[in-house]
Every structure is written in C-alpha cells, then in structure tokens.
Amino acid sequence: MLFSSLEFIFLFLPLCIGIYFCVPLGWRNAVLLFFSLIFYGFGEPVYVFLMVFTVLGDYIFALGVQKSIDRENKRGARLILIAAIIFNLAILAFFKYYDFAVTLISSLPLGIKLRPLNIPLPVGISFYTFQALSYVIDVYRKETAAAKDPLTPATYVALFPQLVAGPIIRYSDIEGQIRKRSHSLTLAADGIRRFSAGLAKKVLLANTAGEMWQSFSKSFEVGNADTLGVWLGVIFYAFQIYFDFSGYSDMAVGLGKIFGFSFPENFNYPYVSESISDFWRRWHITLSTWFREYVYIPLGGNRRGKARMYLNLFVVWSLTGVWHGAGGNFLLWGLYYFLILSIEKAFLLKYLKKAPRVLRHVYALLLILFGWLIFASDGADSSLTLVQALSCIKIMFGAGGAPLISELSKYELTRNIIPLAIMTLASLPLFKRKTLSLLSSKKYGTPTLWALNLLSFLTLILCTAYLVNSGYNPFLYFRF
C-alpha cells in the first residue's frame, strides 16, 4: 500500500485515526501495531510473518544482551550481539542478495551452475532490518534497556508511517515517545499540512518527472541519445528521486505528528549543496547517521590515522551502495562517492571553500547528476544498462558522436519548461524561509496559517484528481 494511493488516503488512514483516538491511551500502541501489520501485509501478506519473526528474534536477543549486562558478563553480551547481527544480516542477504550472488557465481568459469530462486523482495526490508539492529545495539551500548514486553520494540520496527522507506530511527531516540507521547489538534493539523506537502511532491512533481525520465531513457537504450536529451533526462531523474523520496519522508513525518511522534528530518534541500560532503549531510540524513553511528565510528572513524580513516570510508560507502540494491551499479555508485569524498577530505574541500559559491554549486550538481546516471542503471525503472549510463556521461559533454540537439529534445524542453521551473523552485528553501518568516510575524502569522490550511486542502483535491486519472504512481525507495 502506498501513501499516495486512494485506498490509503480515504480508507486506511481515516479508519486508523478514528479507532486510534477512540481507544484508551494504553491501547493505542496495539492499535498502531495492528494497522501497521495490515499496511505491510497489503502487498505480500506472507512477509508479515517474516517481519514478525525478525522482531521476535531481536526482542529475544535484546533480552539476552540485557541479562548478560546485568550479570556483568561482557563476553556473553558481545556474543549475543554478534548472533543478532548475523541473524538480521543473514535474512537481509538471503532475500536481497541471494539471486544476484548465484547469478554472478554461475557466470564465472568455475563449472558451478546455480539457479536463482526469483523470490520477491520483501518491501522495505533494508529499512526495518536496520531499525531492528539498532534496537539490539542500543541495548548492548547501555543507551536503553531491553523492553520486557514485545509490544514496544514491535511498534518501533513496524510503525507504518516509517516502516518501508524511513526515516530510519534509532530505538534510543524514540523509545520514550512509544511509551508516552502527547497529542494535540495543533500537532495533528501540522502533520496534515506536512503530509499534504509530501503528497504534492510525490504525486504532482515526482510522477511528472518520472514520466519524462522514462521517455528520455528509452532513447538512451536504443542509441538515439543527444546531448540536450541526456541532460534533460538525468535532470528529470534527479528531480524524480528527490521529490519521490523526500515527499515520502514528508508524509512519514506528517503522519508521525498526527499520532504524536516526532520523527527526524531526512532531507535538507540537498540540491543546494556546495560539495559532495555537504550533499551527504543533506540527503537521506538518517541513513548517513545510521552508518556513522553503527559502522564508521565503531570501526574507529578518523581517530586511528588517515589510512584507517580511508579504509573505514571504503567499508561504509561499499555498504551504502549494496544497501540500496544487489547490483554492480549500486556498488559502483557507493564507490564513486567514496572516491569523491576521499578526495574532498584529502585536499579538495579547502580549495572549494575559496572558490566562488556558484562554482561550488556547479561542481556539486555535476557530480550528483553523474552519480544518478550510475544509480539509475539497475534495470528496475528503465532497461538502461551501466555501460549505457557511462556512455551517457560522455554524451553530456558532446563526446561519443551523438548530436547536440534533436527535434524531440527541443520539443520536450519547450513543453516542460514550466514544470522544470516549478521543480527547480520546489527544490530550493526559498518558500520555506518565507513561510517561516510570515508565520513568526504578529501581523501575518494567523492569515498565513489559514492560507496554508487552504493550500493543503486544495493540494489534496488536486492530488486526488491526479490519482483518479493516472496509472503512473511508483515509489522508488519501496524496493530498497
């Protein structure tokens, strides 16, 4: 079930909210868990049992870690933690990487032929696996105590607003809210406005950009690419993946507020970045935080010399790449950012700081766009291959013998100049800054709030009209 589906907006969500606020406070987590399991089971019901199995496994592991800590048995706690890590990663590896691994092994001249199982990937398994791991690790670090009842960790992992595409939340950061949280009409209204904004990003902007990317990528696949067409295609893809994922995150944050939760922000206008280091402080913030807290720092971070720091970065960015998917393009994408970030850390950042701001923006955007071409060549959203993606990078600079401009590209640029302008403005913090300024004004605060409420209502109507009349409504990050 998608947040941007009519059944979610007009059936599932109203029913969940209605029952949630009708039951006593002590029952509300149970209601959320019940509806979260229904939400997750909407597509592949059998995978509800896999998630429940994961949650119960980590609940037992956390109890074991806690018991060892209470007995001051550090070795026992460490062994149980290792078992929990193997348990979670084995499940993730089987469902996400088994087919890729056996296909790769079978293609090697080893005389080994294995058959892929072609098992559908459980939705959001990478996200909820990381959250389940966070619970056990936080108990091991004594940042929280193991829950005596399974309801609290189960609600944490399965909570439907952030279940299948984040934000990835540390257990120690949200445990207090699961046990006790406050609700108010003001908070709920703010949540509805945030949900509506995310829905508009997803339905009106991401879907429009995605349709254009699909159109342009077909010409890349058959060798009819031109320089302008490649630039337009990759720009539309960059907008699609940003508005798709940040729109989902906005909806998740908004839904969380309706139910009394405060989720961390996942995006901070990444396309205004002035370096790749800056970009990764703004893009998928909770994933970067997870890898920093649970991989980079435990490996030693930058505390054990430069050689060890670069090795740690290599590990983190290799894992970041394969976390996104079982494919050579994802690993290459992760290593691509490892290389750039290593160069920035080594010497480039100090020179970038001295460069004009416009050059810093151009530098960052160019590298981000090249990265998205590599990322997109997984064959899921288009049949674009990695070789074709790398060829497109050459075409972007007029190399490779491709024409600079085609009639189709000129037509599409003319036809989509207004959507491109709207997407560009929506990716900048201008509207947010102006809105916050007006809301803090004594004179314009209340009128601005009512205007935002009206805008949210109109946005919901417009998005509903789109969903009724359009069959194109994917969510890119659901497959991760």
Image: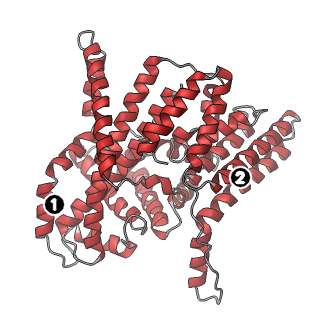
Q: What label sits on residue 89 in the rendered view?
A: none
- In this rendering, the answer to whether 43 lies above or below 157 is below
For the residue labelled by badge 1, is the local secondary structure a helix, a strand or a loop? helix
Residue 344 in the image: x percent, y percent?
A: 39, 52
- In this rendering, the answer to whether 418 lies above or below 63 is below
CA distance separating discs 1 and 2? 49 Å
Q: In the picture provided, is 468 more to the left or to the right than 321?
A: left
For the residue labelled by badge 2, is the local secondary structure a helix, a strand or a loop? helix
Q: As shown in the figure, which amino acid type bears the numbered disc 1?
A: Glu
Marker count (numbered): 2
Residue depicted at x 67% and y 46%: 133
- In this rendering, the answer to whether 158 lies above or below 448 is below
Residue on which the image places disc 1: 412
For disc 2, the neighbor class at 10 Å (few under 14, some 14 to 19, many from 20) is: many
Is residue 348 at all visible to an observer of this figure?
Answer: yes
In front of the other: 302 or 327: 327
Q: In the picture provided, is 350 more to the left or to the right than 137?
A: left
Residue depicted at x 14% and y 58%: 413
Residue lying furthest top: 442
Q: As shown in the figure, which amino acid type bears the numbered disc 2?
A: Ile
Q: What label sits on residue 85 in the rendered view?
A: 2
Q: In the picture provided, is 218 more to the left or to the right than 16?
A: left
For disc 1, the neighbor class at 10 Å (few under 14, some 14 to 19, many from 20) is: some
Please identify the quarter of the rendering in which residue 431 is found. Answer: top left
The answer to which of marks 1 and 2 sits earlier in the sequence is 2
Residue 61 in the image: x percent, y percent?
A: 78, 45
